[in-house]
Amino acid sequence: MTQLVLFNVFNGLVIGAFYALMALGLSLIINLTNVINFAHGGFLALGAYIAYTLQPYLGFWGALIVSPFLTALIGILVERVLIRPLYARDPLYSLLLTFGLAYVLQDSVRYIWGAQGLPIQVPAALQSSLSPTLFFLTGYRVFMVALVAIAVIVLFLILKKTRLGMRIRAGTLDLEMVSALGVDVRILRNLNFGLGIFFAGLAGVLAAGMLGLTPTIGDQLIMPSFVAVIVGGLGSLIGTLFGGLLIGIAAGVVTVFYPSASEATIYVMMALVLLIRPHGLFGEEGGTKL
Amino acid sequence: MNNATVNKSISLIVVWAILLTLPTWIGSVGGYTDLASRVLIIGLAAMSTNLLVGHSGVMAFGHAAYFGLSAYGTGLIIKYLVPSTPLGFLVGVLTGTLGGAIIGYLLAKLRGIYFALATIAFGQVFYFIAFRWNSVTGGDNGLTFQRQPIDLGFAQIDLASSLVFYYTALVVFAVCAALMAVLLRSPFGHTLLAMRENERRARFLGIPVNRHLWLAYTASCVFVACAGSLYGMLNNFVSPHNLHWTQSGDFVLMAVIGGMRSFWGPLLGAAIFVVLQDYLSSITDSWMFFIGMIFVLVVLFIPRGIVGLLQRKTS
């Protein structure tokens, strides 16, 4: 029993790390630009499939590094061409546009790579189990959690220490003021979008290693990521990180007792959080931008 | 009579003339009666969604939930409990409305994109329930049932015929549209408009903004639930896909295509969307790509919708 519980808690942690990775990208984009990126799941799939195509040439490790950058590049292009004209308008429009984009990306992936599921080769070193008793601690899962942790630390370092990061944080608080101080906010929003998409791409490669590739791979992950953002509270990246891990682990624990309710769990949690703290666990009262 | 009222009466006459005669000529332009019913029903759903999106200015991105909930309610009643169409309709609408009232209560405190995010996420709850609860809902395979004739005592309405079903749906549509129009003209409707234009000022005037939002949300769910129940009966089938967030997004897009600021705009948008989808999915496997492109193009080039475009031309 203990082992079963441990197994599912660990599983929840792995899934939670995924959600957090996705949700951090979403959050970055929402915080600075008020754009809810529905196409995040599409970009995730794109990252996964690009890695699949690169793997024969670069190996798993090369693909893991290069694919998120390429995905981010596509994201930057998309922002420049499609999303930039919408900042001045009601957020409804950017939401609808990314919604359509999600359709386009999913169908494009299906068109280019086919509807059938594809396998991605994970290095043998990562496939073995690390411990004979705790069989579920496969190298790949531990590696994934570690990689997510590193990515999150790097993100927070970027935000704290670099000029770009400081500008993003300042822009989250008051974009107009940042603009008045001479920062080109168009470039800032552009790079910030790319940063968010980078995380989607990274999550894509990691997800492909665990779940295999299908064109709808992003669909299963995008809704929980929205929930993670809501539970954590808008405007707080720490909250998003915490929200992702929390719902992942909660879903894992519920799986032990009642597997078919694991998805419903996260929505019940969201409802409870909204009842008690309408702005999310880490969101500030009145901090939500209208 | 000033120009605006003349325009309104003209559009009213045109809309009803088209809706009343639609089954008689849709065949000659390559359509079929069930397609007409679908336009009507999906149009009603888009109009209900627009009650919030266009008229109250809140981003309701989860209306497929109540649409599908109602369809499931209707289907389950007819299949397992009583083979009665009116009862199925009633229970379906009540189920959808109740779902909307509960979720609406949780949402009413939220605003802006936080509201939008929460509507999307909550919309998915019912999807997962329908998907997972195999023994009752049939899971991914959906629920098949058969709509039943309505016995009025002196006569029987044979709903199995597509034509009879269309006109029955049209009656429901007419009642819903009339109620929506009354709602929008009432003091309550004007309050919603005031909240859309300037919520802070509305609050200062002593309007209980959150409660109004909750009521508006619930009212909109009543209508979308009516559409959902009809849609289930039209197809004699409900699947989790009817509850999916993609369906919610489609409703909002239809409102935008037609024109969010107009009463009939969403119906026009739904007609265009439904017919295009029907056509595209018959000629290509990649119809999702083209539907997605329509989203992108509409947002970029005609954000005020077709009605908005026409109004600008005439003024």
Image: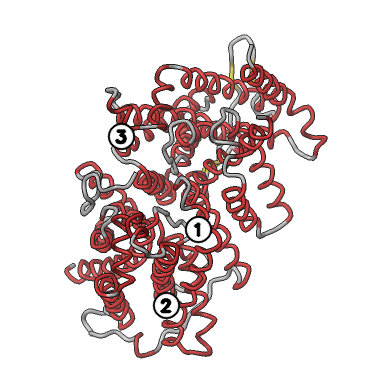
Of A113 and A228, nearer the camera is: A228
Q: Residue at x 43, y 41 (%)?
A: B59
Mark 2 vs mark 1, CA separation in Å: 33 Å
Q: Residues within 10 Å of mark 1 (few under 14, many from 20)?
A: some
Q: Is residue B19 above or below residue B113?
A: above
Task: Tell me the quarter of the picture where residue A196 sits.
Answer: bottom left
Would residue B247 appear left or right of B40 to someone viewing this image?
A: left
Residue B290, percent from left and from top? 65, 55
Mark 1 residue type: Arg
Viewer-side label of 2, 1: 1
Would residue A228 appear left or right of A194 to someone viewing this image?
A: left
Q: Residue furthest top?
A: B154
Q: Regarding mark 1 in the picture, which secondary structure is present there? A: helix
Chain of the residue on which disc 3 is drawn = B
Mark 2 residue type: Gly
Q: Earlier in the sequence, mark 2 or mark 1?
A: 1
- Tell me the residue that label 3 is attached to: B105
Would residue B44 appear left or right of A12 to someone viewing this image?
A: right
Quadrant including the C terminus of chain A: top left
Tag 2 and tag 3 share a subunit: no
Q: Residues within 10 Å of mark 2 (few under 14, many from 20)?
A: many
Residue B83, percent from left and from top? 52, 27
Image colouring:
secondary structure
- Tell me the residue that label 1 is attached to: A84
Q: Residue at x 60, y 41 (%)?
A: B257
- Tell me the residue that label 2 is attached to: A209
